[in-house]
Amino acid sequence: MGYRSEVLIAFTEENNKSFLDFVDADVAIFYENDSEIYKMNGWILYHFDSIKWYDEYKEVSQLKNFINTLDEGFEFHRLGEGGFDHLDHETKGEHDSPFNIYTKTCITFDC
């Protein structure tokens, strides 16, 4: 099954257009078809609830290469499955999107 993450990437509309032009056509289609997409106040957010987020996948590597070219106008969060002793949370960007993105820790159990 593999390690899975929840991923959110928000772009200004301008940066989103640049992102879709930057990546391969099949990667652009992946983001547009395989994520939940939300729009608010000139921003676009892609949400993946449970995704294998490994650098060797071009959907991941091309996104990372793109956001490394940006100084502003994006917000990225990846929350991994973690474990008992740590929270696996990666974040990049200015954190000024209108989506009010934050982490919330909870306890789950099976019965």
Image (spheres, grey):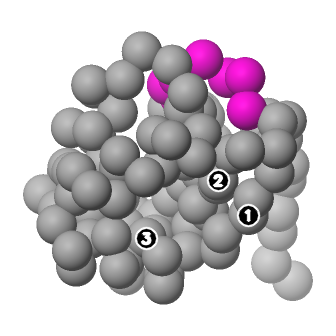
Residue 67 in the magenta stretch? The answer is no
Sequence-wise first label, 2 or 1 = 1
Residue 13 seen in the figure: yes
* Quadrant where the N terminus is found in the figure: bottom left
* Of labels 3 and 2, the one closer to you: 2
In the rendered structure, which amino acid carries the disc numbered 3?
Answer: Tyr
Residue of label 1: 38
Position of 34 with respect to 101 (left or right) is left
Disc 2/disc 1 C-alpha distance (Å):
6 Å
Which range is magenta?
91-97
* Residue name at image x 55 percent, y 74 percent: 35
Badge 3 local density, few (<14 within 10 Å), some, or many (20+)?
Answer: some
In the rendered structure, which amino acid carries the disc numbered 2?
Answer: Ile
The answer to which image quadrant residue 42 occupies is: top right
Q: Provide residue 62's location: percent of width, then percent of height.
A: 21, 51
Disc 3/disc 2 C-alpha distance (Å):
11 Å
Vertical order, 74 against 42 (above or below): above
Sequence-wise first label, 1 or 3 = 3
* Residue name at image x 87 percent, y 83 percent: 111
Q: Secondary structure at mark 3?
A: helix
Badge 1 local density, few (<14 within 10 Å), some, or many (20+)?
Answer: few
Q: Nearer the viewer, residue 28 or 53?
A: 28
**Disc assigned to residue 44:** 2
> Pointers 2 and 1 in contact (CB under 8 A)?
yes
In the rendered structure, which amino acid carries the disc numbered 1?
Answer: Tyr
Q: Nearer the viewer, residue 70 or 82?
A: 70
Residue of label 3: 31
The answer to which image quadrant residue 43 occupies is: top right
Badge 2 local density, few (<14 within 10 Å), some, or many (20+)?
Answer: many
Residue 57 seen in the figure: no
